[in-house]
Image (cartoon, coloured by chain):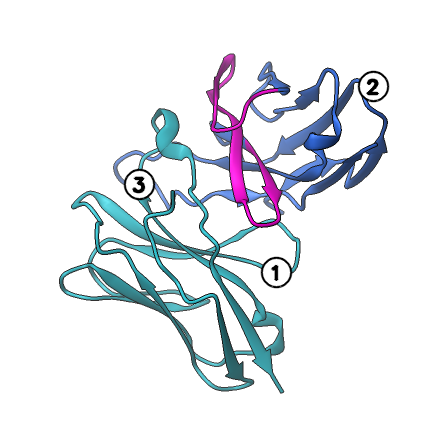
Chain colours: A blue, B cyan
Amino acid sequence: EAQVTQNPRYLITVTGKKLTVTCSQNMNHEYMSWYRQDPGLGLRQIYYSMNVEVTDKGDVPEGYKVSRKEKRNFPLILESPSPNQTSLYFCASSPTPSPGRGRTEAFFGQGTRLTVV
Amino acid sequence: DAKTTQPPSMDCAEGRAANLPCNHSTISGNEYVYWYRQIHSQGPQYIIHGLKNNETNEMASLIITEDRKSSTLILPHATLRDTAVYYCIVRVAGYGGSQGNLIFGKGTKLSVKP
Protein backbone atom coordinates (compact mmCIF):
# COMPACT_ATOMS: atom_id res chain seq x y z
CA GLU A 1 0.00 0.00 0.00
CA ALA A 2 1.28 3.44 -0.96
CA GLN A 3 1.77 5.46 2.18
CA VAL A 4 3.68 8.03 4.15
CA THR A 5 4.53 6.84 7.65
CA GLN A 6 5.35 9.14 10.53
CA ASN A 7 6.62 8.16 13.96
CA PRO A 8 5.78 8.71 16.68
CA ARG A 9 2.10 9.61 16.40
CA TYR A 10 2.09 11.27 19.81
CA LEU A 11 4.95 12.72 21.80
CA ILE A 12 5.21 14.72 25.01
CA THR A 13 8.64 16.10 25.78
CA VAL A 14 10.34 18.74 27.87
CA THR A 15 11.88 21.99 26.76
CA GLY A 16 15.38 21.60 25.38
CA LYS A 17 15.40 17.84 24.93
CA LYS A 18 16.37 17.02 21.36
CA LEU A 19 13.90 14.93 19.39
CA THR A 20 13.44 13.52 15.93
CA VAL A 21 10.19 12.77 14.12
CA THR A 22 10.71 10.25 11.36
CA CYS A 23 8.97 10.21 8.00
CA SER A 24 9.20 7.47 5.41
CA GLN A 25 7.44 7.01 2.06
CA ASN A 26 7.30 3.90 -0.12
CA MET A 27 6.31 5.55 -3.41
CA ASN A 28 9.79 6.55 -4.64
CA HIS A 29 8.76 10.20 -4.57
CA GLU A 30 11.36 12.88 -5.09
CA TYR A 31 9.62 15.70 -3.25
CA MET A 32 9.03 15.59 0.49
CA SER A 33 8.01 18.27 2.95
CA TRP A 34 7.01 18.98 6.53
CA TYR A 35 4.04 21.05 7.69
CA ARG A 36 2.81 22.13 11.07
CA GLN A 37 -0.84 22.80 11.81
CA ASP A 38 -1.99 25.17 14.51
CA PRO A 39 -5.51 26.39 15.39
CA GLY A 40 -6.35 29.55 13.49
CA LEU A 41 -3.13 29.41 11.45
CA GLY A 42 -3.83 26.39 9.26
CA LEU A 43 -1.06 24.30 7.73
CA ARG A 44 2.29 25.96 7.18
CA GLN A 45 5.30 24.48 5.44
CA ILE A 46 8.44 24.08 7.56
CA TYR A 47 11.00 22.56 5.19
CA TYR A 48 10.97 20.76 1.89
CA SER A 49 13.30 18.57 -0.15
CA MET A 50 13.27 18.18 -3.89
CA ASN A 51 15.57 15.15 -3.85
CA VAL A 52 18.33 13.42 -1.92
CA GLU A 53 20.72 15.92 -0.30
CA VAL A 54 18.58 18.85 -1.49
CA THR A 55 16.62 20.66 1.21
CA ASP A 56 15.27 24.18 1.60
CA LYS A 57 13.35 26.31 4.04
CA GLY A 58 9.63 26.70 3.90
CA ASP A 59 7.60 29.42 5.58
CA VAL A 60 8.35 28.61 9.22
CA PRO A 61 11.79 26.91 9.46
CA GLU A 62 13.06 28.47 12.71
CA GLY A 63 13.86 25.90 15.36
CA TYR A 64 13.82 22.94 12.97
CA LYS A 65 16.33 20.94 10.98
CA VAL A 66 15.87 18.26 8.33
CA SER A 67 18.01 15.85 6.39
CA ARG A 68 17.51 13.82 3.22
CA LYS A 69 20.19 11.15 3.05
CA GLU A 70 17.91 8.61 1.43
CA LYS A 71 15.06 9.15 -0.98
CA ARG A 72 12.47 7.46 1.19
CA ASN A 73 13.25 9.18 4.52
CA PHE A 74 12.91 12.80 5.59
CA PRO A 75 13.29 13.21 9.37
CA LEU A 76 12.36 16.40 11.19
CA ILE A 77 14.75 17.35 13.98
CA LEU A 78 14.06 19.69 16.87
CA GLU A 79 17.46 20.36 18.46
CA SER A 80 16.07 22.29 21.41
CA PRO A 81 12.28 22.14 21.47
CA SER A 82 10.31 24.97 23.01
CA PRO A 83 6.63 25.20 24.01
CA ASN A 84 5.80 27.24 20.90
CA GLN A 85 6.64 24.17 18.84
CA THR A 86 3.72 22.34 20.36
CA SER A 87 1.73 21.49 17.27
CA LEU A 88 0.39 18.84 14.92
CA TYR A 89 3.02 17.92 12.34
CA PHE A 90 2.51 16.38 8.92
CA CYS A 91 4.97 14.93 6.47
CA ALA A 92 4.04 14.84 2.79
CA SER A 93 5.53 13.44 -0.40
CA SER A 94 4.88 14.00 -4.10
CA PRO A 95 6.33 12.79 -7.38
CA THR A 96 8.12 15.28 -9.58
CA PRO A 97 5.82 15.99 -12.51
CA SER A 98 6.94 15.58 -16.08
CA PRO A 99 5.11 15.39 -19.42
CA GLY A 100 2.98 12.28 -19.48
CA ARG A 101 3.49 11.71 -15.76
CA GLY A 102 0.58 10.84 -13.56
CA ARG A 103 -1.12 13.03 -11.03
CA THR A 104 1.04 15.29 -8.93
CA GLU A 105 -0.95 15.33 -5.74
CA ALA A 106 0.67 15.26 -2.32
CA PHE A 107 0.34 12.28 -0.01
CA PHE A 108 0.28 13.09 3.68
CA GLY A 109 1.20 11.06 6.71
CA GLN A 110 -1.20 10.60 9.61
CA GLY A 111 0.40 13.28 11.70
CA THR A 112 2.47 13.60 14.85
CA ARG A 113 0.99 15.46 17.78
CA LEU A 114 3.85 17.03 19.71
CA THR A 115 3.54 18.66 23.10
CA VAL A 116 6.53 20.50 24.58
CA VAL A 117 6.22 21.34 28.26
CA ASP B 1 -2.02 34.16 2.08
CA ALA B 2 -4.44 31.75 0.44
CA LYS B 3 -5.66 32.88 -2.98
CA THR B 4 -9.07 31.34 -2.45
CA THR B 5 -12.28 32.18 -0.59
CA GLN B 6 -14.53 29.48 0.79
CA PRO B 7 -17.55 29.54 3.10
CA PRO B 8 -16.49 28.56 6.61
CA SER B 9 -19.11 25.85 7.01
CA MET B 10 -21.84 23.94 5.20
CA ASP B 11 -24.33 21.21 6.06
CA CYS B 12 -25.49 18.43 3.79
CA ALA B 13 -28.00 15.62 4.24
CA GLU B 14 -26.66 12.13 3.91
CA GLY B 15 -27.23 10.74 0.41
CA ARG B 16 -27.59 14.18 -1.12
CA ALA B 17 -25.05 15.93 -3.30
CA ALA B 18 -22.69 18.28 -1.50
CA ASN B 19 -21.70 21.32 -3.55
CA LEU B 20 -18.74 23.19 -2.12
CA PRO B 21 -17.96 26.56 -3.75
CA CYS B 22 -14.62 28.28 -4.05
CA ASN B 23 -13.75 31.72 -5.37
CA HIS B 24 -10.33 32.30 -6.92
CA SER B 25 -10.74 35.53 -8.82
CA THR B 26 -6.99 36.23 -9.12
CA ILE B 27 -6.07 32.85 -10.60
CA SER B 28 -3.33 32.92 -13.23
CA GLY B 29 -3.38 31.10 -16.55
CA ASN B 30 -0.92 28.42 -15.42
CA GLU B 31 -2.52 27.77 -12.06
CA TYR B 32 -4.60 24.73 -11.31
CA VAL B 33 -7.42 24.35 -8.82
CA TYR B 34 -6.76 21.57 -6.30
CA TRP B 35 -9.07 20.20 -3.65
CA TYR B 36 -7.97 18.39 -0.50
CA ARG B 37 -9.90 17.38 2.56
CA GLN B 38 -8.93 16.73 6.15
CA ILE B 39 -11.00 14.39 8.25
CA HIS B 40 -10.74 15.35 11.91
CA SER B 41 -6.99 15.72 12.54
CA GLN B 42 -5.81 13.18 9.99
CA GLY B 43 -3.41 14.06 7.19
CA PRO B 44 -4.98 15.98 4.30
CA GLN B 45 -6.21 13.81 1.46
CA TYR B 46 -6.08 14.74 -2.21
CA ILE B 47 -9.47 14.74 -3.94
CA ILE B 48 -9.19 16.20 -7.42
CA HIS B 49 -7.63 18.96 -9.48
CA GLY B 50 -8.29 20.75 -12.77
CA LEU B 51 -7.12 23.56 -15.02
CA LYS B 52 -10.14 24.69 -17.00
CA ASN B 53 -12.13 21.63 -18.01
CA ASN B 54 -14.53 19.93 -15.67
CA GLU B 55 -13.02 16.86 -14.04
CA THR B 56 -14.48 13.75 -12.47
CA ASN B 57 -12.93 10.88 -10.58
CA GLU B 58 -14.11 8.19 -8.21
CA MET B 59 -14.36 10.63 -5.34
CA ALA B 60 -15.84 13.81 -6.77
CA SER B 61 -16.48 16.16 -9.67
CA LEU B 62 -14.91 19.55 -10.18
CA ILE B 63 -16.74 22.23 -12.10
CA ILE B 64 -14.69 25.27 -13.10
CA THR B 65 -16.41 28.33 -14.53
CA GLU B 66 -15.46 29.48 -17.99
CA ASP B 67 -13.65 32.55 -16.67
CA ARG B 68 -11.89 30.27 -14.09
CA LYS B 69 -12.66 32.69 -11.27
CA SER B 70 -14.63 30.15 -9.29
CA SER B 71 -15.19 26.44 -9.01
CA THR B 72 -17.43 23.93 -7.27
CA LEU B 73 -16.50 20.59 -5.79
CA ILE B 74 -19.36 18.11 -5.97
CA LEU B 75 -19.64 15.02 -3.81
CA PRO B 76 -22.51 13.28 -5.59
CA HIS B 77 -23.84 11.18 -2.71
CA ALA B 78 -22.45 12.46 0.56
CA THR B 79 -22.00 10.00 3.43
CA LEU B 80 -21.25 10.59 7.10
CA ARG B 81 -17.62 9.71 6.36
CA ASP B 82 -17.40 12.76 4.09
CA THR B 83 -17.65 15.04 7.12
CA ALA B 84 -14.37 16.96 6.95
CA VAL B 85 -12.72 20.29 6.25
CA TYR B 86 -12.39 20.81 2.49
CA TYR B 87 -9.61 22.99 1.14
CA CYS B 88 -9.56 24.65 -2.25
CA ILE B 89 -6.00 25.49 -3.32
CA VAL B 90 -4.77 27.36 -6.36
CA ARG B 91 -1.24 26.64 -7.54
CA VAL B 92 0.93 25.74 -10.50
CA ALA B 93 1.22 22.00 -11.17
CA GLY B 94 4.98 21.80 -10.81
CA TYR B 95 7.06 21.33 -7.69
CA GLY B 96 10.05 23.50 -8.49
CA GLY B 97 11.31 25.10 -5.34
CA SER B 98 8.62 26.75 -3.29
CA GLN B 99 5.97 25.82 -5.87
CA GLY B 100 5.59 22.60 -3.93
CA ASN B 101 4.25 24.51 -0.95
CA LEU B 102 0.54 23.97 -0.63
CA ILE B 103 -1.07 27.11 0.76
CA PHE B 104 -3.97 25.87 2.87
CA GLY B 105 -6.55 28.47 3.81
CA LYS B 106 -9.25 27.91 6.41
CA GLY B 107 -11.35 25.69 4.16
CA THR B 108 -15.01 24.74 4.47
CA LYS B 109 -16.13 22.52 7.31
CA LEU B 110 -18.68 20.18 5.74
CA SER B 111 -21.02 18.40 8.13
CA VAL B 112 -22.99 15.54 6.64
CA LYS B 113 -26.05 14.82 8.75
CA PRO B 114 -28.20 11.68 8.87
Residue at horizontal 52 percent and vertical 86 percent from the top? B15
**Residue B5, which numbered label?**
none
Residue at horizontal 41 percent and vertical 68 percent from the top? B60
Q: Is residue A52 magenta?
A: yes
Q: CA distance from mark 2 to mark 1?
A: 31 Å
Residue at horizontal 70 percent and vertical 37 percent from the top? A6
Residue beneath label 3, please? Answer: B93
Between circles 2 and 3, the one closer to the viewer is: 2
**Residue A17, which numbered label?**
2
Q: CA distance from mark 1 to mark 3?
A: 24 Å
Secondary structure predominantly adopted by residues drawn in magenta:
strand
First-in-chain label (1 vs 3): 1
Give, as a single range, the part of the protein colored magenta: A34-62
**Which chain's residue wears label 1?**
B
Q: Is residue A86 magenta?
A: no
Residue beneath label 1, please? Answer: B39
Give A3 or B104, whichever is nearer the viewer: B104
Between circles 1 and 3, the one closer to the viewer is: 1
The percent position of residue A53, horizontal first and vertical second, equals 51, 12
**Which chain's residue wears label 3?**
B
Q: Left or right: where does residue A105 sit relative to residue A71? A: left
- The amino acid type found where label 2 is placed reads Lys
Circle 3 sits in a helix, a strand or a loop, which is it? loop
